[in-house]
Image: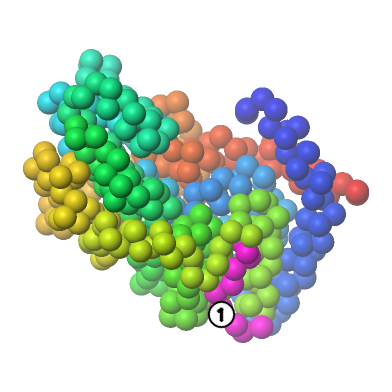
């Protein structure tokens, strides 16, 4: 347990307690209405984004809503779904003497096969190769400009990070020795896939609503999710990340289900619009092309990745170092034995259903990719999902103001 977590939590919840209680009561009311109207005893709501899962778990949202409403995480952690193949290619580059710039969570992710007995960038650094952990690409630019050695920045992320990379490429801010390896992924195809899978091999209870990503939607606009509500006939709520945002989003989903409606709604109105950031979208289109991309443990999803366009290949690590893309024929299982990360990110199982969870796989010694990042569902559950914490939150929320 992290020090200070209770006091921080109490501070937030004391402020919001009255409102939280009202929303929770409404959720209970609508859940009862839904059950009596449909006879359905259980339903699932998918929270797509890693930051939503973080708030839900850390603030004990599951413990204050009816227990037959299951909140399951989706594939909203970019590091978790970066294929093992690319981690191995990056290790090879590092072993050839290229300076690698990476975010901290990519640094710790383990690959499936490894290279010369090295399975992660952190292991590679312990062998003496030059891998530098940076908080963002600007730090990498400054650092690479000073030393002038051949370098690569590993650009992992979703739509949220792409405008920053696009701006840097358009403005030619990369020094000649630093190349971008874009491994950016697009979220809507993954959401469609998660819903398709849940229908092909029906999961019980079914996914009946989506808490859609707030950060991604600031760029793409909420319009991106309209096909989900229209084609799958389920409510979608673009939600903020405070506990109250998430509770209000759950309430909205239940209201729509009770009233037989399936619409996309913006709850996160303080940051998200219907059309999103038009300039960012334009820059992304100018710099990147959309490609079929691989998602770790899942496989290829059509039109789900971004790579630099040909006109920017002088800044492209794939071109500079003749790196090959993974193909559907070459892709195969790339999760460690017994790791259920693919099912975790598709909302089919909870981390606790993995036999390795908090046994051989822990945040300190992660086995699978979902146990590494701050946005990885297994890591979040390992850090914040204890029963003790959930009980504490329940007590705080139900205390009379
Ligand atoms: Fe994979 Fe570890 Fe999560 Fe199990 S607990 S699904 S091994 S990341």
Which residue lies most toward the right here? 400
Q: In the image, is residue 119 part of the stretch drawn in magenta? A: no
Residue sitting nearer the eye, 355 or 306: 306
Q: Quadrant of residue 365?
A: top left
Residue visible at 20% across and 44% down? 315
Residue 40 in the image: state x and y as whole percent: 61, 75
Q: In the image, is residue 267 part of the stretch drawn in magenta? A: yes
Residue visible at 17% across and 29% down? 150
- Give the magenta part as a residue range: 259-269
Q: Quadrant of the N terminus?
A: top right
Which residue lies most toward the front here? 171
Residue sitting nearer the eye, 160 or 174: 174
Q: Residue tagged by mark 1?
A: 262
- Confirm whether residue 160 shows in the render: yes
CB of mark 1 near ligand 1 (< 8 Å): no
Q: Count the marks: how many? A: 1
Residue visible at 56% across and 80% down? 262
Residue visible at 26% across and 57% down? 288
- Confirm whether residue 44 shows in the render: no
> Main structural element of the magenta stretch: helix, strand or loop?
loop
What crowding class fits label 1: few (fewer than 14 Cα within 10 Å), some (14-19), or many (20 or more)?
many
Q: Quadrant of residue 89?
A: top left
Residue 388 in the image: state x and y as whole percent: 69, 36
Q: Quadrant of residue 109?
A: top left
Label 1 SS: loop
Q: Is residue 97 left or right of residue 13?
A: left
Q: Is residue 362 above or below residue 31?
A: above
Residue 180 in the image: state x and y as whole percent: 25, 42
Residue 182 in the image: state x and y as whole percent: 26, 47
Q: How is the image coloured?
A: rainbow
Residue sitting nearer the eye, 303 or 138: 138
């Amino acid at each position: 347990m992290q020090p200070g977590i209770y006091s921080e939590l109490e501070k937030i919840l004391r402020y919001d307690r009255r409102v939280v209680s009202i929303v929770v009561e409404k959720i209970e009311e609508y859940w009862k209405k839904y059950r009596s109207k449909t006879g359905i005893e259980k339903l699932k709501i998918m929270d797509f984004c890693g930051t939503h899962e973080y708030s839900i778990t850390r603030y004990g949202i599951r413990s204050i809503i009816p227990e037959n409403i299951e909140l399951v995480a989706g594939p909203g952690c970019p590091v978790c779904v970066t294929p093992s193949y690319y981690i191995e290619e990056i290790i090879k580059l590092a072993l050839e003497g290229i300076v690698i710039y990476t975010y901290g969570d990519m640094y710790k992710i383990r690959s499936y096969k490894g290279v010369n007995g090295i399975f992660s960038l952190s292991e590679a650094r312990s062998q003496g190769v030059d891998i530098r952990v940076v908080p963002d690409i600007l730090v990498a630019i400054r650092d690479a400009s000073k030393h002038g050695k051949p370098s690569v920045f590993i650009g992992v992320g979703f739509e949220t990070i792409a405008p920053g990379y696009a701006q840097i490429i358009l403005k030619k801010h990369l020094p000649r020795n630093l190349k971008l390896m874009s491994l950016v992924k697009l979220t809507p195809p993954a959401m469609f896939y998660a819903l398709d899978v849940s229908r092909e091999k029906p999961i019980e209870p079914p996914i009946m609503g989506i808490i859609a990503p707030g950060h991604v939607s600031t760029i793409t606009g909420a319009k991106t999710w309209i096909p989900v509500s229209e084609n799958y006939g389920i409510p979608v709520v673009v939600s903020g990340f405070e506990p109250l945002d998430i509770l209000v989003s759950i309430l909205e989903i239940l209201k729509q289900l009770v009233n037989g409606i399936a619409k996309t709604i913006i709850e996160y109105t303080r940051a998200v619009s219907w059309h999103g950031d038009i300039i960012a979208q334009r820059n992304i289109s100018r710099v990147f092309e959309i490609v079929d991309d691989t998602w770790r443990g899942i496989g290829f999803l059509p039109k789900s990745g971004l790579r630099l366009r040909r006109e920017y290949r002088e800044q492209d690590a794939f071109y500079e170092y003749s790196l090959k893309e993974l193909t559907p024929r070459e892709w195969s299982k790339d999760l460690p034995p017994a790791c259920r990360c693919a099912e975790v990110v598709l909302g089919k199982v909870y981390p606790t259903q993995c036999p390795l969870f908090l046994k051989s796989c822990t945040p300190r010694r992660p086995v699978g990719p979902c146990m590494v990042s701050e946005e990885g569902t297994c890591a979040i559950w390992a850090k914040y999902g204890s029963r003790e914490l959930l009980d504490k939150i329940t007590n705080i929320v139900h205390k009379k103001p």
